[in-house]
Amino acid sequence: MRTALAAWLRRLAAWIDVPAPLDALAERSYFLVRHQESQNPHSAGESKRHQVYARLIKEFPTRSKRELARAIEDAL
């Protein structure tokens, strides 16, 4: 009985999507996006995105550009 319950709980846990803890890139992109939104509320969204993207390229030179862009989109 216990092994069947344990097996069922393992299968159930595999279906649950547990959010991963934020890494440094995700935290920084979230902060920079919020900062741009508060500092430049009337500028275009693409302009704010470009500012955050340029900053992330400088701060995370080893990460791929795709990862940086994805982090910005996730922060939005």
Image (cartoon, grey):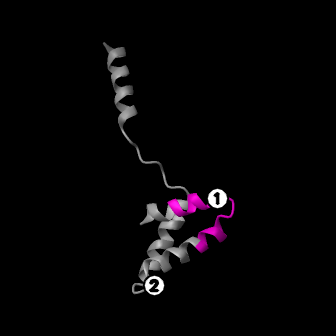
> Where residue 21 sits in the image (x, y, percent)?
48, 51
Q: Is residue 76 magenta?
A: no
Q: Which residues are magenta?
A: 54-70
**41 left or right, relative to 56:** left
> Where residue 13 sits in the image (x, y, percent)?
37, 32
Q: Amino acid at mark 1?
A: Arg
Q: Amino acid at mark 2?
A: Gln
The residue that appears at 65% across and 64% down in the rendered structure is 60
> Where residue 65 sits in the image (x, y, percent)?
61, 62
Q: Nearer the viewer, mark 2 or mark 1?
A: 1
The residue that appears at 63% across and 68% down in the rendered structure is 57
The single residue placed furthest to the top in the displayed view is: 1
The label shown at residue 63 is: 1
- Dominant secondary structure of the residues highlighted in magenta in the image: helix
The single residue placed furthest to the right in the displayed view is: 62
Mark 1, secondary structure of its residue: loop
Q: On screen, 71 above or below 15?
A: below
Rounded to the nearest angstrom, the CA distance separating label 2 from label 1 is: 26 Å
The residue that appears at 41% across and 66% down in the rendered structure is 76
The label shown at residue 39 is: 2
Quarter location, residue 58: bottom right
Q: On screen, 3 above or below 23?
A: above
> Where residue 34 sits in the image (x, y, percent)?
44, 74
Q: On screen, 8 above or below 53?
A: above
Dot 2 crowding, Cα within 10 Å, few <14, some 14–19, many 20+: few
Q: Nearer the viewer, residue 33 or 43?
A: 43
Dot 1 crowding, Cα within 10 Å, few <14, some 14–19, many 20+: few
